Amino acid sequence: MGNTNGRPETLAQVRERKGLTQNEVARRLKVTQGFVSKVENGIEFPTENIERWVKVYGTRTQKEFRRLWSNSFQLPLWRDFAVPEEPVVPQNVEGLMAVIYDEAKVIGETEMAKKARLA
């Protein structure tokens, strides 16, 4: 079943639709809430007791569970990014450095931003 936002359904959405929290799932599966979070975010895959995971999430088959799991770590869609109305074209080196620094602030300070600030 798909979402209204155009993305495939994930394990977290299935759990939420069932009215369960990650803690409740963890308790039922005898794992930590952190492990449930990692599974729902596509970071880990439960290699043990897969049938119990299938049952708790209410998927019909292991294949369906794996499909929902694989949907959990998709790259963002292009439409999720804001596109400026007009492109930013710096007129000089100082302008370029300001654009780099501003972009770095948006995504967090990076080594590139640190170098740009020190230059």
Image (cartoon, rainbow, N blue to C red):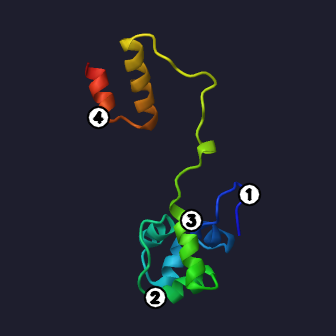
Report, in whole angstroms, how far the alpha carbon at label 3 lies from the one at label 2. 21 Å
Tell which circle, 3 or 4, labels the residue nearer the N-terminal end: 3
Amino acid tagged 4: Glu
Which residue is disc 2 drawn over?
49
Quadrant location, the C terminus: top left
Tell which circle, 1 or 2, labels the residue nearer the N-terminal end: 1
Report, in whole angstroms, how far the alpha carbon at label 3 lies from the one at label 4. 32 Å
Quadrant location, the N terminus: bottom right
Which residue is disc 4 drawn over?
111
Residue at the spot 42% in from the left edge and 75% down from the top edge: 32
Identify the element where label 1 is drawn. loop
Tell which circle, 3 or 2, labels the residue nearer the N-terminal end: 2
Which numbered disc, 3 or 4, marks the residue closer to the eye?
A: 3
Q: Quadrant of residue 54?
A: bottom right
| Mark identifier at residue 71 | 3
Tell which circle, 1 or 3, labels the residue nearer the N-terminal end: 1
Residue at the spot 29% in from the left edge and 34% down from the top edge: 111
Q: Which is nearer the eye, 94 or 30?
A: 94
Which numbered disc, 3 or 2, marks the residue closer to the eye?
A: 3
Eyeballing the image, is 86 above or below 60? above
Amino acid tagged 1: Thr
Question: Is residue 39 toward the left or the right of residue 11 in the image?
Answer: left
Identify the element where label 2 is drawn. loop
Which residue is disc 1 drawn over?
4
Identify the element where label 3 is drawn. helix
Q: Which is nearer the eye, 110 or 96?
A: 96
Residue at the spot 65% in from the left edge and 58% down from the top edge: 7
Residue 6, image x, y percentages: 69, 56
Q: How crowded is mark 2: few (under 14 residues within 10 Å), some or many (20 or more)?
A: few
